[in-house]
Amino acid sequence: MYVTIGYDQLATPAGLDRGGAVDRFDDIRAAALDLFTGRGFHATTMADIGAAVGMRGPSLYKHVESKQDLLARIMTTTMEALLAGYRTAVASSDDPAQRLRRATEAHVRYHARHRLEAFVGNREIRSLVEPHRARVLTLRAEYEHGFRDLVADGVAEGVFHVDSARLASYAVLDLGMGVSAWYREDGELTEDAVVWQYSTFALRLVGHRGQERLSRPSPA
Amino acid sequence: MYVTIGYDQLATPAGLDRGGAVDRFDDIRAAALDLFTGRGFHATTMADIGAAVGMRGPSLYKHVESKQDLLARIMTTTMEALLAGYRTAVASSDDPAQRLRRATEAHVRYHARHRLEAFVGNREIRSLVEPHRARVLTLRAEYEHGFRDLVADGVAEGVFHVDSARLASYAVLDLGMGVSAWYREDGELTEDAVVWQYSTFALRLVGHRGQERLSRPSPA
DNA sequence: CCGTTCGGCTAATAGCTGTTAGCCGGAACT
DNA sequence: AGTTCCGGCTAACAGCTATTAGCCGAACGG
């Protein structure tokens, strides 16, 4: 049996209304996300989602358009958030190494902090139906292309050393996807530790010198 | 519409029996693997698999125990093949760097050459039902632990430099999973090129010195 | 040349799916 | 107080699922 964590506490305690500060839709979205992560989109039924927020399956349609729409919203907002993080990261510097470090930090941090969204976003593209799928794939391609350019810039400036920028950028991106699969908020490694180490991995991976340092320099 | 490639040609040409050299079961397994990869286990119906090998859904049961069994066979043989590759790799040397290089080569090569098996193996554990799931997860844990030990050995000998061997081994393993998602036999990069570059990435990632070289040394 | 087995087929079963229709209690406005 | 509307409910629908049962032609062994 899959265990829902956290979301039940957010639901209004049956009779005492919080005044609409937290919409019922948000609860449903959160519960759906949780279930999609745990058992997959196709293996999750509307009745399951309903049970997780304390109602029957059909009642969900008073708040939600369809199961497909629920997935589509999750996936598009996730891709847009990743892209926004990437753009902020590259705008913060002109140095290729610094930019790749920041972009990887944003990438990994999102995959750690929003691991459910990221997990579903990576694994359920196949379950998305056509108008949405194309849109998400376009965003995803744009995101990948951004990282590829970052690597290519560093190679052009002679600070990175890889045969194929495409391969290296795939490798960096795949690191993040892994994080969303195994990261746990209550694990032995803090979010900052994972973010720092993984962005160091990224710089090492592209052959940038001076990444022998093991721990993060104190932010003086 | 999802397109089946290759397997139809393997099927006996309707009337001319190959003498049982290629069992019907192998065709079915291959078709199922192809469909599981393309649309996922739950989204694939027995009728789909049947159509891919030229028969109706129910007829499959003359060759196959169940859909679940089909998945279980695919996933266990995949994990066992990966473990076997790992064992051969580590037995080939005593040097930590050499062992990690070889193990990563085996890992990446398997994910490139058997990308469908590897892809399904990584993504459909959730669809596996209980006696099988536990078995596959055990094998997987063993595999992961092997890579972690490899990294830890290198750190102990002072040739690798990472804060967390666990994190680094996850990173290396995630690289392989990525390969199974994007690698194509007819792509611009040969299997050998991907294998070599990714194993170099792995050594760079764990902070091993002397990985600035860009191309593989000619095997003299 | 007859019986058996193999490997296909269709029909049927039993169950589950997302979604719609329509009912209804209670809160909220006027 | 009366009306409206929100947000639950059950019943129903239409469709699809894996799997089983049982039929039947053809190949094969004797």
Image (cartoon, coloured by chain):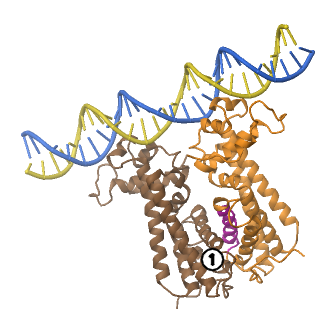
Chain colours: A brown, B orange, C yellow, D blue
Is C17 on the left or on the right of B48, as rendered? left
Q: Residue at x 47, y 74 (%)?
A: A85
- The image shows a total of numbered marks equal to 1
For the residue pair B156 and B110, the one nearer the viewer reads as B110
- The answer to whether one can see residue A4 in this image is no
> Is B177 within the magenta?
yes
Give, as a three-letter code, the residue at label 1.
Answer: Ala
Q: Estimate the x, y position of residue D30 in percent, counting from the top left.
A: 93, 15
Disc 1 is placed on an element classified as helix
- Quadrant location of the C terminus of chain B? bottom right
Q: Residue at x 69, y 39 (%)?
A: B69
- Image quadrant of residue B193? bottom right
Q: Residue at x 56, y 79 (%)?
A: A150
- Identify the main secondary structure in magenta: helix
Q: Estimate the x, y position of residue A2 in percent, counting from the top left.
A: 54, 49
Is B51 on the left or on the right of A12, as rendered? right
Is A131 on the left or on the right of B150, as rendered? left
The residue furthest bottom is A220
Magenta segment, which residues? Answer: B164-179
- Image quadrant of residue A72? bottom left
- The answer to whether one can see residue B156 in this image is yes
The residue indicated by pointer 1 is A202
Q: Residue at x 40, y 52 (%)?
A: A28
Question: Could you tell me which chain the residue with mark 1 belongs to?
Answer: A
Position of B98 relative to B176 (above/below): below
For the residue pair A172 and B34, the one nearer the viewer reads as B34
